Image: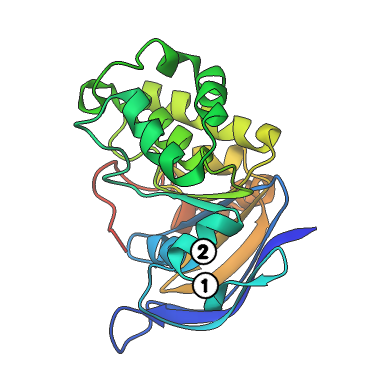
Amino acid sequence: MSLLRIAGLSGGYGDVDIISGIDMVVAEREIVTIAGTNGAGKSTLIKAAMGLLPRLSGEMNFNGIDLMRLAIEDRIRVGISYVPQVRNVFGTLTVLENLQVVEHVTGKPQRIREMFELFPALAGRRGTYAENLSGGERQQLAFARALMSSPRLILLDEPSAALSPALTDQVFAEVRKLPQAGVAVLMVEQRARQALAFSDRGYILDSGRIVLTDTGANLLANEEMGDVYIGRGHGAGSPGTHAQI
């Protein structure tokens, strides 16, 4: 069953479209990765799904609800969460305080206990300021904050950005757990080859348009497309060099 359905989506920040004619589907408890070259519009597409793009046309439907009519806070209420690439936790608050900020909005205090059970490494760091966490711990906290609202879909923008290979493996291990918790994932990831290895499906973007979609395994097996859009080795580009587009 389709959870998120996007049809003919186009938009940008000015008069020129950054994404154009996007058709995309994310099913229940599915991991979907968006890959492509630098500047292809990957992060813009994620922001559009969250309602962060100022100019949009087309259709976005989430669980039978017309997203085009909803503000960001309403998208959260209907079951969508977003983890941006940067500024995804409050560094001057402790781990516990970061979760309590969300709890004050959701009114679900029991979720804090559930997050510490889901991310046991955070439980032992609950009194630590977020700015003193490791990169992997910060991403776990960002995931926990996003999951506090009990979403059905989580949007991830470059979750491995600026992380070492070891920390990237830790973060990806957490991403793989999300469908088990009943959460679908739509993810932009610079280390596309690694991400597609555990993704149900993937979409390849080029100049703001989808040029190919298939299962993660089939995209990895497509050597011609892989060399151009996915890259060799562990990632689609060097960490820290990708465009914020």
Which class describes the residues within 10 Å of circle 1: few (<14), some (14-19), or many (20+)? some
In space, the residues marked 2 and 1 are separated at their CA atoms by 6 Å
Q: Is residue 221 left or right of residue 52?
A: right
Say above or below: 106 vs 21: above
Identity of the amino acid at label 1?
A: Leu
Residue 138 rendering spot, x and y as whole percentages: 33, 29
Asked if residue 156 lies left or right of residue 151, the reply is left
Pinpoint residue 196: horizontal percent, then vertical percent.
Answer: 57, 44
Q: Residue at x 36, y 49 (%)?
A: 84
Q: Residue at x 38, y 37 (%)?
A: 160
Question: CB atoms at circles 2 and 1 under 8 Å apart?
Answer: yes
> In the figure, 171 relative to 227: above or below?
above
Q: Quadrant of the N terminus?
A: bottom right
Labels in figure, total? 2
Left or right of 29, for residue 185: left
**Residue drawn at 43 percent across, 14 percent down:** 123
Q: Nearer the viewer, residue 122 or 94?
A: 94
Residue 16 at least partly seen = yes
Screen quadrant of the C terminus? bottom left
Q: Nearer the viewer, residue 96 or 202?
A: 96
Type of amino acid under label 2 = Asp
Question: Label for residue 53?
Answer: none
Examine the image and state in which quarter residue 97 appears.
Answer: top left
- Residue with the mark numbered 2: 74
Residue 70's label in the rendered image is 1
Residue 233 showing in the rendered view: no
Mark 1 falls on what kind of element? loop
Q: Position of residue 31 (x, y in %)?
A: 63, 46
